[in-house]
Image: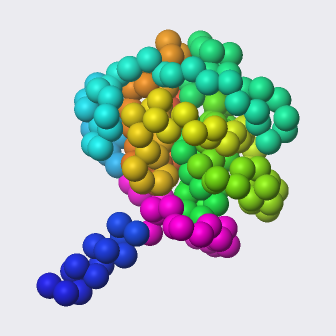
Amino acid sequence: MNRWCLTLAFVFAACQQPDTVTPATPPDTTTAATIDSAAFMQALPHLAEGANLSLPFPAPDFALSTLDGDTLRMADLHGDWVLLNFWATWCAPCLVEIPDLAALHTDLNPHGFHVVGVSLDEEGFGVVEPFAQKLEISYPLVVDNGTMAAAYGGIYSLPTTFLIDADGQVINRFVGLFPSAEMHAPLRDMLGLSVE
């Protein structure tokens, strides 16, 4: 029983923001959680676990500076699919999924699919930029200005990722690692592409 309680306490604390933030070293592994693709497609219009908003809901708009200095607006992405990923440099699981998200963005971006990373690092781009360079993140990164997490129903665990359709509706919320390998084929299908 004590071992079980200790394990739960460790898992709960793993991606809760610490009092003092020290960026983690990016892990070497790129494993991801798996889900059943058919079950995902059937479960799109459901109440996301832990979310304060019932799905689907209109994606809240935002206008934030990217790491490159451009302004990114959700409204500018209307008509395309968006994977909005909340993460932080101090969250080891977040760093595990970054290479998979970058590959997904590279493959699907020419077909109207965008991965957007939303950092919850309070230190801003000062800690995000070195990680972005080291991990060669190919998708746009913004830093939450204190309003985005709340606008998306609250972010209680990292990583948390939202799938937004071409009509600007949030249709799914993934808490934990985004299952890029499992979702690649369904996403290609939703974009009208041949499934590899």
* Residue sticking out furthest to the front: 19
Q: Where residue 193 sits: x, y (%)?
A: 56, 24
Q: Is residue 93 visible?
A: no
Q: Is residue 28 magenta?
A: yes
> Vertically, is 95 above or below 43?
below
Residue 14 found in image quarter: bottom left
Q: Where residue 141 sits: x, y (%)?
A: 71, 41
Residue shown at 67% from the left, 47% from the top = 102
Residue shown at 52% from the left, 67% from the top = 18
Residue shown at 70% from the left, 55% from the top = 123
> Vertically, is 6 above or below 120?
below
Count of all numbered marks drawn on residues in the image: 0
In the image, taking residue 151 as reference, residue 121 lies left or right, namely right
Q: Where residue 128 sits: x, y (%)?
A: 73, 54
Q: Is residue 107 magenta?
A: no
In the image, taking residue 172 as reference, residue 20 lies left or right, namely right
Is most of the magenta stretch helix, strand or loop? Answer: loop
Q: Is residue 121 visible?
A: yes
> Vertically, is 98 above or below 23?
above
Span highlighted in magenta in the image: 14-34
Residue shown at 50% from the left, 12% from the top = 167
* Residue sticking out furthest to the right: 69
- The answer to which of 21 and 46 lies nearer the viewer is 21
Residue 66 found in image quarter: top right
